[in-house]
Amino acid sequence: MAQLEVIISGGFQGPYNQMLPSFERMTGIKVITKSGASQGSGPKTIKAQLLAGTSADVVILSREGLAELIAMDKILPKSDADLARAPLGLAVPVGGQKPDISNLKSFREALVKAQKIVVPGSTSGIYLTTEVFPRLKIEDQITVQVTERGSQATDLLAARGANIAIQPSSELVNVPGIDYIGPIPNDVQLIQTFAAAIVVNSAHPENAKKLIEYLRSQESAGPIKRSGMDLVP
């Protein structure tokens, strides 16, 4: 049986998990899935794993993270393709008080009142900690915990180790133990595009191309929408 190796970040994990079984049945290609953060520091980022020699045929991550890999000549030229988009959203522990985040003022008040906020250390967390929180001038009024992965942030929130999590909506919907409130205000919103690309020196470039095409096919519409994401125009 043909094989394929994929490293994927949390942003597109929902649609990918829903579509992978049918892709494997249809093509007879067995896919080995590994995970990594789109950006950030530490050995678990996709960039760090590739630099350390981890094998992969396809990477799926935020456009910001993919841009770094392209700049490092780790991606087969013209093999990249956008898959879906996700806004930043906010969630609270299940059953917790649901804050009003309908405008910038109420969003800021909700963050200050929550005090303990958890964000992933990847693209969204970098944006929040370096741009949004300083712009709102709340750094000295909140405690922010940064986790390596988005799944670690939601685990912490579900365990009530934090009062609010902010990260891509696709990482917050359908997660046990938390309630997804909705997207954060447009004034501070970051719409992330998640994309796939073939890794330079892939052992199976044709199979990699088939997977990316399938993830962009009409079959993706339902899984993408169910995961709190939007289709790419």
Image (tube, rainbow, N blue to C red):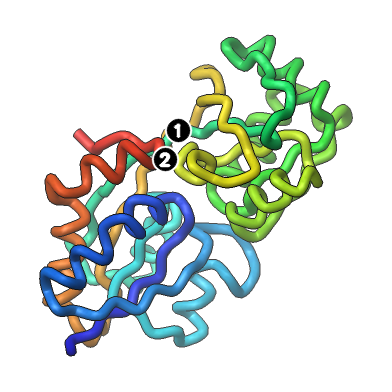
Is 175 left or right of 58, judged from the image as shown? right
Tag 2 and tag 1, C-beta contact below 8 Å: yes
Amino acid at pointer 1: Pro
Nearest to the observer: residue 131 or residue 203: 203
Q: Percent position (x, y) of residue 190?
A: 48, 32
Of pointers 2 and 1, the one earlier in the residue sequence = 1
Image point (56%, 43%), residue name: 124
Q: Which mark identifies residue 192?
A: 2
Above or below for 30 versus 70: below
Q: Amino acid at mark 2?
A: Gln
At label 1, counting other C-alpha atoms closer than 10 Å, the crowd grade (few under 14, some 14-19, many 20 or more) is: many
19 left or right, relative to 112: left
Element type at marker 2? Answer: strand
Residue at 37 percent across and 64 percent down: it is 71
Other residues around mark 2 within 10 Å, as few (<14) / some (14–19) / many (≥20): many
Residue 19 left/right relative to 229: left
Residue at 73% over, 50% down: 156
Residue nearer the viewer, 137 or 204: 204
Q: Which mark is residue 87?
A: 1
x, y percentage for residue 106? 68, 11
Quadrant of the snapshot with the N terminus: bottom left
Residue at coordinates 53% horizontally, 61% vertically from top-left? 37
Query: In the rendering, at what x and y percent does residue 178 appear?
Result: 63, 39
Classify 145 as above or below 202.
above
Q: Identify the element where label 1 is drawn.
A: loop
